[in-house]
Image (cartoon, rainbow, N blue to C red):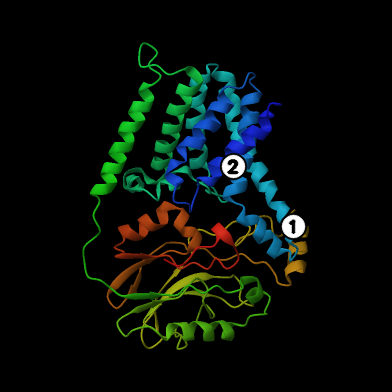
Amino acid sequence: MPAVPPPVLALLLGALLGLCGLPLPWSFLSFLPLAGVLAFAASARTVEGVPGRLFWSGVGYFAVQLWWLTAFLGKLFQFPPAGVLAFALFVLEGLFLAVMAYPLARLVRSPVARVWALAGGWVVLEWLRFLGPLAFPWPTLGYGLLPSPAIQIADLGGVLLGSVLVAGTAAALAGGWVGGWSLGRQGRGRPVLLAAVCWVAALGYGLTRTPGEGPVQPMLVLRTAFDSFGRAAGRLTADEQLQIQRQASARRTPDEVLVWSETALTAPATQTVLPQFPGPGISGLGTPLYERPERNDVVSIDGTGQITSREAKAKLVPFGEYFVFYNGILRPVYRLIENQLHFELSSAQPAQIVEPLTLEGVRYGAYICYDSVFPWVARSLTRQGAELLVNPSNDGWYSGWGCSSTS
């Protein structure tokens, strides 16, 4: 039987790691395929083989985790095969892993030490993906803990502390694999025991967390799947969308606060009364296509339709809500996309500061869609007295894992 070529095996290991990602119930086991990725990369016979194997694993990992981008691009260009363009991103993310691995492979020669170096480099790379104007922190290993109580350690160090737990456990297993198991003088089994202790501590901490106490506010949260491309191109009018949402809101009981999703309403930024919204409640508010700069806000609206407070989206989606070099070297590319979509791309105006919304004496920490990926947004709102966090999202642009609901 012929041996499996290293790139193919690396690709399969990365894909297996991706299959342990969200939103699957076994995500907390992602340290197992990650151990295979680390061990296979670290055991390469040449220095160049280490980043090469990690590159192919990264391509497989991101291709599975972000496969929904292929569907998005197919809809964007109204030509399903155009989804293959997403593989440029998968390759780029794999290159980041390879660039991280190459100097480590040259500096560290022992396979066991390489395993630990690569695990640490992986977490550092995740941290770097949260930074800068082109931040793209998907996927992050720590989110794999969501199906287990261990996710509560995010209280102590954010989602990246979860990544440390996952990567450390994987490194302990991979180190024992490539170096041989021993509890004696070499002690390569000891990191596994230490990892087990860390898991027990994390699970114990999670199980001792108790729900917050306080008054209960009934809410009706709408999840409406609109054709966002059709709305942007004018095939779905704002009035048609409004009518659908008003019909869905009719089942609300008098004591419930209503929540509509991101950009569910459309109005000029200067408008202060929205009588079409059956308040009291919270809704996303977008500006009309003719208004520049574009805004992506969330507002609280009382029973009379009066806007009581307003908050803008803090973190804009790169190449979705703001466009780098729009009037520069990328202008021909943007023009091609605009011609295909039949509407003009425009950059939104981000929030200068984030503050909770106020509605009927309650302070709501409302952060919009992409804001939820960056911990500083929710933390800032909480520090300012937010009593409940609300994430109104409209992911009607996407399909599959890229499509989530308001929460």
Residue 395 horizontal/vertical position (percent)? 55, 65
Q: Which residue is mark 1?
A: 82
- Label 1 neighbourhood size at 10 Å, few (<14), some (14-19), many (20+)? some
In the image, residue 288 sits, relative to residue 89, either above or below, namely below
Task: Report whether 52 appears left or right of 34.
Answer: right
Q: Is residue 177 visible?
A: yes
Task: Report whether 23 appears left or right of 106.
Answer: left
Q: Amino acid at mark 1?
A: Ala
Question: Mark 2 or mark 1, which is nearer the start of the sequence?
Answer: 2
Closer to the eye: label 1 or 2: 2
In the image, residue 229 sits, relative to residue 211, either above or below, namely below
Task: Report whether 277 appears left or right of 334.
Answer: left
Image quarter hosting the N terminus = top right
Residue 152 horizontal/vertical position (percent)? 32, 48
Nearest the eye: 314 or 28? 28
Q: Across the whole image, how many numbered discs are drawn on residues? A: 2
In space, the residues marked 1 and 2 are separated at their CA atoms by 22 Å
Image quarter hosting the C terminus = bottom left
Residue at the (68%, 29%) spot, across then down: 4
Q: Give the residue at the far top of this rendering.
A: 185
Nearest the eye: 383 or 202? 202
- Label 2 neighbourhood size at 10 Å, few (<14), some (14-19), many (20+)? many
Residue 394 horizontal/vertical position (percent)? 53, 68
Q: Amino acid at mark 2?
A: Ala
Q: Is residue 96 visible?
A: no
Residue at the (64%, 59%) spot, across then down: 323
Q: Give the residue at the far front of this rendering.
A: 1
Query: Residue 25 has which mark?
Result: none
In the image, residue 144 sits, relative to residue 183, either above or below, namely below
Residue at the (55%, 72%) spot, across then down: 225
Q: Which residue is mark 2?
A: 15
